[in-house]
Image (cartoon, rainbow, N blue to C red):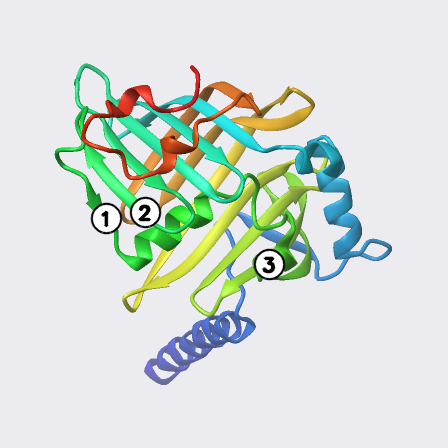
């Protein structure tokens, strides 16, 4: 009986090791509630999936015509609410500010295509230039759309991994290798081609950072389909819910909004023409 008991434990251990090794060897990550339906999709290619996805968003013509985006949203994080404003302008300029409800001071981040900066308060008193990693991160946030759009120009490598069922929805799973340290998995609804989930895996300072984003409440804004609710879970760090209250396309944004502001500029007055 004792021998049989240990034999069962040994077999169980081998089974667990086999599963772990197979997952590691596959190199692919899955959501906790993801079920792989098919490792390939007969009759549809990666190119066709992307074409349908862009068409569902409003069409590549509409997407290519975007020269600037200004948004205003409410974020809930750590049980507190924040007012967030962001602005993007072609080519690759980005800026956002956030303010805790009931608190006067703002936090600002900006990227002018070359330099990234951060400031606190209503003036330049606490402004500083950011390091290379943070500059790179803000540069990526300057993209109007995800890595799926014009991925070759951005230097990403895409692979269609098949069909996965997540939360009862069949999705096309696409793997985007951004660089040797960052990979993003996109889950596109098989029926309406809306992006449902993204799962990013990034290695920073020898640590693996996983970030899951859930997109919902899609609405058309000037012919462009936009998710107005985004839940972000950066595992081990924070979980937040963002509700977009305002989304403007090509509304006109001053270039100086993205530059390191001069000491005479009140920061909250320099984002566009709101």
Residues at marks 3 and 2 touching, judged by CB atoms closer than 8 Å:
no
Q: Is residue 81 left or right of residue 173?
A: left
Mark positioned earlier in the residue sequence (3 or 2): 2
Q: Which residue is mark 3?
A: 175
Eyeballing the image, is 204 above or below 6?
above
Mark 3 vs mark 2, foreground winner is 2
Residue at (40, 80) in percent of width and height: 10
Q: Residue furthest right?
A: 43
Residue 261: give x, y in percent of width and height: 27, 34
Eyeballing the image, is 21 above or below 43?
below
Evaluate whether residue 191 shows in this view: no
Which structural element holds mark 2? strand
Residues at marks 1 and 2 touching, judged by CB atoms closer than 8 Å:
yes
Q: Is residue 100 left or right of residue 228?
A: left
- Nearest the viewer among 207 and 11 is 207
Q: Which residue is mark 2?
A: 116
- Nearest the viewer among 31 and 59 is 59
Q: Which residue is mark 1?
A: 129
Mark positioned earlier in the residue sequence (1 or 3): 1
Residues at marks 1 and 3 touching, judged by CB atoms closer than 8 Å:
no
Which structural element holds mark 3? strand
Q: Is residue 240 left or right of residue 130?
A: right
């Amino acid at each position: 009986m004792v021998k049989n008991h240990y034999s069962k434990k040994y077999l169980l251990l081998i089974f667990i090791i086999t599963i772990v090794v197979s997952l590691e060897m596959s190199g692919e990550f899955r959501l906790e509630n993801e079920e792989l339906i098919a490792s390939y999709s007969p009759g549809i290619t990666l190119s066709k999936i992307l074409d349908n996805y862009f068409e569902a968003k409003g069409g590549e013509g509409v997407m290519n015509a975007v020269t600037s985006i200004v948004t205003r949203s409410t974020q809930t994080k750590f049980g507190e609410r924040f007012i967030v404003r962001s602005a993007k302008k072609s080519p690759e300029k980005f800026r956002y500010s956030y303010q805790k409800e009931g608190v006067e001071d703002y936090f600002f981040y900006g990227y002018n295509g070359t330099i990234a900066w951060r400031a606190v308060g209503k003036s330049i008193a606490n402004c500083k230039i950011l390091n290379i990693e943070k500059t790179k991160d803000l540069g990526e946030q300057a993209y109007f759309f995800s890595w799926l759009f014009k991925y070759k120009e951005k230097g990403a490598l895409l692979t269609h991994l098949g069909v996965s069922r997540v939360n009862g929805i069949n999705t096309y799973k696409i793997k985007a290798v951004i660089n040797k340290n960052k990979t993003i998995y996109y889950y596109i609804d098989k029926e309406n081609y809306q992006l449902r989930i993204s799962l990013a895996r990034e290695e920073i300072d020898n640590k693996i950072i996983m970030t899951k984003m859930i997109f919902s409440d899609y609405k058309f804004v000037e012919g462009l389909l936009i998710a107005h609710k985004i839940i972000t879970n950066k595992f081990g760090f924070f979980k937040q819910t963002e509700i977009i209250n305002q989304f403007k396309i090509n509304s006109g944004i001053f270039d100086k909004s993205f530059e390191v502001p001069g000491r005479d500029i009140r920061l909250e007055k320099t984002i566009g023409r709101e």
